Image (cartoon, rainbow, N blue to C red):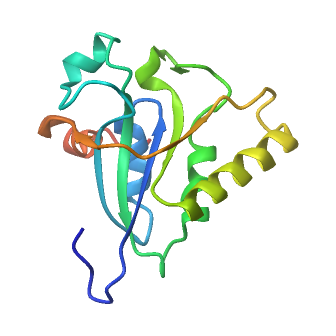
C-alpha cells in the first residue's frame, strides 16, 4: 500500500448493502484517500459481479477504503457505517436481499477488531435500531475489486448523493 506525503495510510473495509451507495458516502469524507468497491468474505477467487449475484460465492459487496488517520479516525468511519444502513436486517438492505448485501465489518488489525466489537456492543445496548444487530465482524480476507463500471458508479451516472 503506497504512502501519502506524511507517510500515513490505513485501510478499512465495510459491507452495508449495495456497494454503490456506501462508496458514495465514504468518498466524500475528509481524510478518505481512496475508495474501491468489490467483494470480500467469500469462497471463490476473483469473483465477478455476476458470480456474486448468483448467491453461491458467499462474498459480500464491500467498500475498501484507504484513509489518513490524522484526518479521520477508524472510529469515525465506524460511526458512518452505523448511520448509513440498517444493521438489524439479515442479508438485506432495503429492496436488496441475499448474502452479498449483509452487514459486515472486515477488520485489518487487532485494534480495528477491538473498536468494531466495542462499537457493535454499544449500539446493541442503546437499542437505537429497534432490533438486535446482526453485523458480522470478521478478519479481512482478500479484496477482489469489482469491474470498472461499478467503481464510483453513482458519480459516473450523476445520480446524486446516497
| Left or right position of 93 against 133 | left
Residue 21 drawn at (x, y percent): 40, 39
Total tally of numbered discs in the picture = 0
The quadrant of the picture occupied by the N terminus is bottom left
Could you say which is closer to the camera, residue 22 or residue 105?
105
Could you say which is closer to the camera, residue 7 or residue 34?
7
User: Image point 36% across, 43% down: which residue?
Assistant: 141
User: Image point 41% across, 75% down: which residue?
Assistant: 68
Residue 92 drawn at (x, y percent): 53, 19
Determine which quarter of the picture holds residue 66.
bottom left
Above or below residue 9? Residue 93 is above
Q: Say if residue 161 shows up in the picture.
A: no
| Left or right position of 21 against 16 | left
Q: Say if residue 145 shows up in the picture.
A: yes
Could you say which is closer to the camera, residue 54 or residue 159?
54
Residue 39 drawn at (x, y percent): 31, 35
Above or below residue 102? Residue 95 is above
User: Image point 15% across, 35% down: which residue?
Assistant: 147
Determine which quarter of the picture holds residue 160.
top left
Residue 104 drawn at (x, y percent): 53, 37
User: Image point 86% across, 44% down: which residue?
Assistant: 126
Residue most extreme to the bottom: 6
| Left or right position of 159 against 139 | left
The quadrant of the picture occupied by the C terminus is top left
Amino acid at each position: 500500500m503506497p504512502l501519502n506525503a506524511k507517510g500515513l495510510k490505513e485501510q478499512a473495509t465495510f459491507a452495508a448493502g449495495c456497494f454503490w451507495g456506501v462508496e458514495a458516502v465514504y468518498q466524500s469524507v475528509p481524510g478518505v484517500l481512496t475508495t474501491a468497491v468489490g467483494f470480500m468474505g467469500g469462497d471463490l477467487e476473483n469473483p465477478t459481479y455476476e458470480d456474486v449475484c448468483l448467491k453461491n460465492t458467499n462474498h459480500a459487496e464491500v467498500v475498501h477504503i484507504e484513509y489518513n488517520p490524522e484526518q479521520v479516525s477508524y472510529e469515525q468511519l465506524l460511526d458512518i457505517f452505523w448511520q448509513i444502513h440498517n444493521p438489524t436486517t439479515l442479508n438485506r438492505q432495503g429492496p436488496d436481499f441475499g448474502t452479498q448485501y449483509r452487514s459486515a465489518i472486515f477488520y485489518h488489525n487487532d485494534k480495528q477488531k477491538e473498536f468494531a466489537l466495542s462499537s457493535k456492543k454499544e449500539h446493541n445496548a442503546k437499542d437505537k435500531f429497534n432490533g438486535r444487530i446482526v453485523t458480522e465482524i470478521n478478519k479481512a480476507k482478500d479484496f477482489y475489486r469489482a469491474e470498472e463500471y461499478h467503481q464510483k458508479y453513482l458519480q459516473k451516472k450523476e445520480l446524486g448523493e446516497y
